[in-house]
Image (cartoon, rainbow, N blue to C red):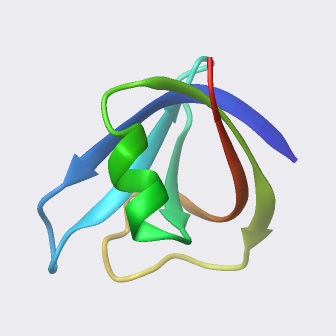
Amino acid sequence: MKVTGTVEFVDLEGGLYRLTADDGKRYTLLGSRGELKAATGKRVEVEGALDEGFGIGMSGAQLRVARVKKI
């Protein structure tokens, strides 16, 4: 799946990256922390697959990131 939105860092349970999509939905991003850190605060298109359930942060569905493209 592809989702467009803005990446933010949430300082919860050791920190997590969250995507707030253009439609208002939130996703906890799983993947390369370096790539996600570089995308923090930027509008991006994320390509990946949804994981079942919620993680420790309970900050939205978990999206396992395959690719991040800054737009």
- Give residue 12's position: percent from left, percent from top: 14, 68
Above or below — where is 8 with respect to 17? above
Instruction: Identify which residue is drawn at 48% across, 41% down.
Output: 19
Viewport quadrant of the C terminus:
top right
**Residue 60 in view in this figure:** no
Number of callouts: 0
Instruction: Identify which residue is drawn at 20% across, 69% down.
Output: 15
Instruction: Identify which residue is drawn at 51% across, 76% down.
Output: 54
Give whichever of 48, 39 is nearer the camera: 39
Instruction: Identify which residue is drawn at 37% across, 45% down.
Output: 38
In the picture provided, is 67 more to the left or to the right than 42? right
- Give residue 3's position: percent from left, percent from top: 73, 35
Above or below — where is 56 with respect to 71? below
In the picture provided, is 32 more to the left or to the right than 48? left
- Give residue 20's position: percent from left, percent from top: 47, 33
Specify the quadrant of the image occupied by residue 7.
top left
Specify the quadrant of the image occupied by residue 5.
top right
Above or below — where is 71 with respect to 19? above
Give whichever of 22, 34 is nearer the camera: 34
- Give residue 13's position: percent from left, percent from top: 16, 79
**Residue 5 in view in this figure:** yes
